[in-house]
Image: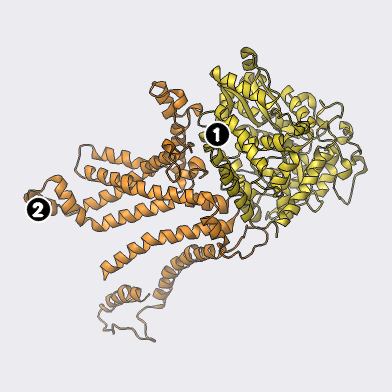
Amino acid sequence: MADIESALKGQVSRREVLKKGVVGAAGLTVLPAVLAACSSTAASPSPTPTPAATPTPGGATPTPGTATPTPAAAVTGTFHLGNNHSDPSDLKGVQAIDAAFIKENPGVNIVLNTVDHGTFQDQINNYLTTTPDDVFFWFSGFRMRFFAAKGLATAIDDVWATVKSNYTAGFATSVTGDDGKVYGIPVDYYPWCVFYRKSLFSDKGYTVPNTFDDLLTLCAKMKTDGITPIAFADKDGWPAMGTFDILNLRLNGYDFHVGLMTGKEKWTDAKVTSVFTTWQKLIPYYTAGFSGLTWQQACDTLVRKTGGMYLLGLFLTGEIDTVDTTGAAKKDTDFFPFPYMGNSFDAEKSLDAPIDIVMMSAKSQNLQADMVPAKAYVAYWAKGTTQLLMYQANNGFIPTASDVDTTKLDTLTQKAVQVVSAAQKITQFLDRDTRPDFAGAAGMQSFLLKFLATPTQDLAALQKSIQDYWDKLPAFGG
Amino acid sequence: MSKLESEGLAPASETFSGAGVALPVQRHHHYSLLTAHDKVLLALMVGIPLFVFVILIWITTLASIVLSFTDWQLIGNWHWVGLDNYTQMFTTYPFFWTAVRNNLLWLLFFLGFATPMGILLAVCLDRQLRGGWLYQTIFFTPVVLSLAVVGIIWNLQLSPLAGNGFIDSMLTGTGLVAPANAPNWLGESTPLFGLPFPFPPLGMISVLIVASWRHIGYIMVLYLAGLKSVDPALREAAAIDGANERQTFFHVVFPVMAPINRVIVVVTVIEALRAFDIVWILSHGKEPLQLLSTLIVSNALSESSLIGFGSAIAVFLLLVSLIPIIAYLTRVMRSED
């Protein structure tokens, strides 16, 4: 297991870097301030650095004017796009961006291959090793570096050199592989917070809980009012990971969490037991039948105000808009960071805030022929105007480009930006921070479902079986 | 091949020789009754299926067995790990035993309920009921539906109350069940009646009912075809001897149907072992609805790509599957002898 530790360690230090120095920066309402810092560590060994694009040391926000890449001459040709944005609203966003790209480059033909989000993930290994599309959407962090290290992604340092001035250094580190090369363009990110309906809270006289005890008191009160206090659904297997992450971060801190994800810490640790025993207190307040519900169904209870609070990613606003097309429900939606435990880790204000990226594959049969339009397309995603098109399709995806027109972002997004900026430590999400073979449906997803089915079960036995599963995984990268 | 030559080719060559030319029946090494054209045709007819069979069945099966002793992950290096995958499967991996439990339950439920129901329906429909074709169509429809449709239909029925599931909405809407007690048909992993493992959770029972919905129609059609071939004279003779309907079926028709019965049992066992699709559509085989087949897929074919470990589970499933197949084949061969 030593090699996995070292393999994941790179991520640790980079992630630390990613988060530091943000707090205390003035003007946090400005989006580009997010993750702005530490440009000294930005690793981009591009042979042709553009002087104008060099980030200012000290975490200064790039000036939008200088950040905009110079418009390239129109390109022509065909390229293939593997699209995992299969939800209707997200697909519309991709289609709008493709249309805009073709409008600027009339000679380009995009072969769009839309695959169900979950299926795409399941098949990613097979996909990247056999007949991948030229360009595909994926996740930053460990999951990107994993494929980059296996030679299944094409380094795009040349593209990055033209667009990096539009990104803060934190984002730069999130797309840098273990070899120091750049393998992706950050396209969006979203924090995991507790969402609620403002009108429900004001009607019933509820106040936003700041501590975990406040949360439990509020839950008890909501229950007597006939409201399901916490909307929860885990038919998809991954949503429960969000709760594990935040409880572990709050109870045991960022360092322990990352250590656990990378195998340095053990699942049999008493600290993990404390996560489960704390979680036990929340489960009685969950939506009945949560293991048979999809996250969308749980989100609908928030829209109908039968559910009180919901810990999920900001992307849930897309589902709210789907259910309530008038937009009233979304206007009435607000969120708060998961309540604090009153321990030394409160100051970390940590949370999950995964970054999505667009990448280029290495094994695509057409790659050489498609290179020029494909790279132009990837670069196109680095523009604020492009990302705004996606944002307009689904407000859950916060743009990452520095030159994005912040006046186009709604108040909820502005607030999300602030919450992420205020966090000292940011994690990507359990299944992005650890080995994919550990986090899957036959692994961690089922272990968490097993816990949720009988929360009072023999926790020591459960934790041991999780650790055993980890220990039996093939040596990493060796 | 010798069987093929002696039974298949020799008579064919005799037919050719029947045109008037006297040719020796036994074959000589340098003298063939087959023309070059025949040989090419034969080679193609035997070779192509054999080639496909070897590639798709034998090589892949052998590959799975070999892979089960490795830690291959599709990409990157791999190592021989001996029996590690097997020891993990049998000792520390809890979901393996859940899957074995579920497959066994599937088998018992099918043998004890779904298959007998299919037979019962077939016997009823064989009695020339008025509108029998209508019933037949209704019972057979689930078999014809695509699995994606089956998944959608039952997801809508079995969703929890918060997900507007039809059954729960009906139960609570009519006041039969309080909303707080509405069952979570699919996801409920809490042990049924509080009974511990290996007793099944409610979710598994729901899945078995959905699976039976298709299986009953399938068995019904198979059995109905068999019943149609039973000589009516046998029934008449039984009737003349004074046997009632029940006696006629159990003492005359059922024994005559022995070959079909064997096929039905084998089909049922194989269905239970290869059960996959409905569970995959409804829950992707996550806890507590794992089957051996879903564990193979979610370990070996998902983003996990634990091909070695998944292969070990596949080899276990192969060995278990061989038992009914070998039992059936030895019986068939013995009766042929």
Q: Secondary structure at mark 2?
A: helix
* Colour seen for chain A: yellow
Q: Which residue is mark 2?
A: B237
In the rendered image of the structure, the colour used to display chain B is orange
Q: Residue at x 38, y 86 (%)?
A: B29
User: In the picture provided, is A80 more to the left or to the right than A65?
Assistant: left
- Which secondary structure lies at badge 1? loop
Residue A109 vertical placement versus B156 (above, below): below
Residue A352 appears in the figure: no
Viewer can see residue A203: yes
Name the foreground residue: B289 vs A468.
A468
Q: Position of residue A53 (x, y in %)?
A: 89, 41
The chain that hosts pointer 2 is: B
Mark 1 to mark 2 CA distance (whole Å): 60 Å
Colour scheme used in the picture?
by chain
Circle 1 Cα neighbour tier, 10 Å, few/some/many (<14 / 14–19 / ≥20): some
Residue A69: percent from left, percent from top = 85, 38
- Write down the chain letter for disc 1: A
Query: Quadrant location of the C terminus of chain A?
Result: bottom right
The answer to which quarter of the image holds residue B39 is bottom left
Q: Which residue is mark 1?
A: A294
